[in-house]
Image (cartoon, helix red, strand yellow):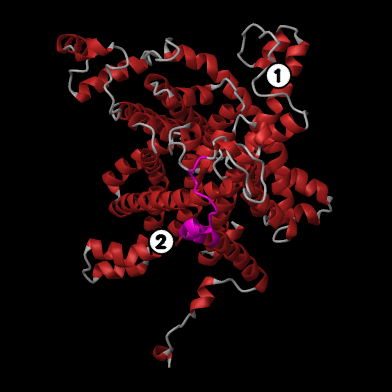
Amino acid sequence: MLLHYLRQRLAFAGVALLGVVVVAFLVAHMVPADPLAAVLSDIATKDPSIRAQYMKRWGLDRPLPEQFLYYLANVAHGNLGESFTTRRPVLEDLVQYVPATVELSIAAFAVSVVFGVPLGVWAALRHNRSADHAARFISLVGAASPIFWTGLIALYVFYYLLRWAPGPGRLDPHQVLPPVVTGFLLIDSLIAGRVDAFLSALGHIILPALVLGWFIMGLTARTTRSALLEVLAADYLRTARAKGLGERRVIGIHALRNALIPVLTVAGLAFASLLSGAVLTETVFAWPGIGRYAVTAATRLDYPAILGVTLLTGVIYISVNFIVDLLYGVLDPRIRV
Amino acid sequence: MAGEAPPLVISATLGLVRPGHRVRARSNTALWTGAAVVGAWALVAVFGPLVAPHSPLDLDVMNRLQPPNASHLFGTDEAGRDNFSRVIYGARITVPVAVGVIAAATAIGVGIGAVSGYAGGRTDEVLMRIVDVVLAFPSIILAMAITAALGPGLAHAMLAIVLVVWAEFSRLMRGQVLAAKANDYVLAARALGASTSRVLLRHVLPNAFPPVVVKGTLDIGNAIILTAALSFIGLGAIPPAPEWGAMIAAGQTKFEYWWVATFPGLAILSVVLGFNFLGDGLQDLLNPRLRDA
């Protein structure tokens, strides 16, 4: 049964991956600009024989479906083209920038759990009372704030006015980057035995993580609240109370444990929001991750780079959801059928 | 007597509002707060030119980067333009853009979702796989890629957002149609010989619509943020157009001139909050059971 479920999920993921490549290909072909203008000089783009030669070289003279197969083969080999701006293979750029984004996203997710889960618990226990409304209001404001603006305000208050937080970037300007092992600065600096760099990196990640975490906290809080409300009505809790367990134990151990399963799976859902939010947070905080890379690429019309990021985020999203689906299957046997 | 039972009459309000004044009062609070905020912004958008003390575009280099004062309530930007007037004129761009984008996305999404849910089988399978793929991208990244491909500009940004947002409406509508389709009255209509389009338009759609209205209202807020974000990056509205996202971008590196970015941001926050309250209130009104789910 589990094997059947696994096969089915794998087939879904495969179809979705293929679809993601199709979308990237289609977007690339929406480009109204002359694709040769980016690589050829002005005079060369006007010479029909040179044009024809280049069209042939890159297969641009082939019918669209055939071009797609070329593209698919290239993508399968990890060849995402060369960025117009960095003049490096896009894959190399992505490998360099992904860890910063992952580090920031993990920190932000931790922030959203640390603040969002208690907020959700509080709201559920005071269901329909003022605390519940307050929690709802906080979630609504979080969801309604444009994150690039929240980031700027946070920088203005905590960096410019109060001087509590260091400025944008991952590290103080005078710090030398520790040698890259994992790409996560917080880990690499410790591996290199550089406590100063670790503290600097920690200081730099707090503000963007709070901003990005606040952005998805509403989702975490709402999910915790509704999951806990559902569990609170369950019979086994009444049993737990009836046998004389303290309220703290009933809520903390019995109720929360079951309510956290949906909260953990929200990680899959929140992931897309997190990536979306990271794009803009990175831009505001000059955080050298794929979001900032994508924004720079998009504003300079660097198509290979922006398509590379698009493809990558689609692939990551599908993989994360595939894993979440599998976990569902493992955790909840009913789903496999 | 058994066959003579009077028809069951359900009064209009009974079906909509759950008994208990507490719930009713609260849902009205969210609904009316949202309606008031959205209504106020709609008025600002319509009567902006009458309210704004200055032109949103006129340069006044002598008065550049003035802090908020009596003649420039929100200060001036780096070209001496009046920030208050620009925020007001911004509503004339943002609100219609977001409403238009969501109207278009809803139309496409509802159409595809309804067909998918009603037809079922292979059609359903293919359409939903397409929806899955669109949903696999973070919305801002796909919108950025499409806008970059089409070329920067507000119209292209709008098109990009429509292409990104419709998919969620499809999935929602499909689920609604699947649920509505199972009702006896639909079976009855079909048994009476009603055509597919008639069943779909007259019997299925009206009952499937309330959640779509709620989602549409909530998504206007998201569309506002997405439009502003694309403009902030430099892919949407082109400066010096008084678009809020572009205005925030203009103020982003100037911490000592905080007013340039702060006020357009507050404008976005308040109008989005308005739409979110409105959507939340509509949710309570249209489907009170969902509240506790």
* Residue B49 among those drawn in magenta: yes
Find disc 1 in the rendering and name its residue.
A201
* Residue A192 among those drawn in magenta: no
Front residue (pair A257, A133): A133
Judging from the image, mark 2 belongs to the subunit labelled B
- Looking at the rendered structure, the kind of residue marked 2 is Phe
Q: Are marks 1 and 2 on the same chain?
A: no
- Classify residue B219 as left or right of residue A21: right
- Classify residue A204 as left or right of residue B244: right
Give the residue at x 38% y 19%.
Answer: A304
Find disc 2 in the rendering and name its residue.
B209
The residue at the far front in this view is: B62
What stretch of residues is rendered in magenta? B40-59
Task: Name the spot of residue A209 as percent of width and height, x first.
Answer: 66, 30
Q: Secondary structure at mark 2?
A: loop
Give the residue at x 59% y 35%.
Answer: B251
> How many numbered marks does the figure carry?
2
Judging from the image, mark 1 belongs to the subunit labelled A
Front residue (pair B266, A195): B266
Residue B65 visible in the current orientation: yes
Front residue (pair A223, A84): A84
Task: Name the spot of residue B165 as percent of width and height, x first.
Answer: 41, 44
Magenta part mainly helix, strand or loop?
helix
- Looking at the rendered structure, the kind of residue marked 1 is Ala
The residue at the far bottom in this view is: B1
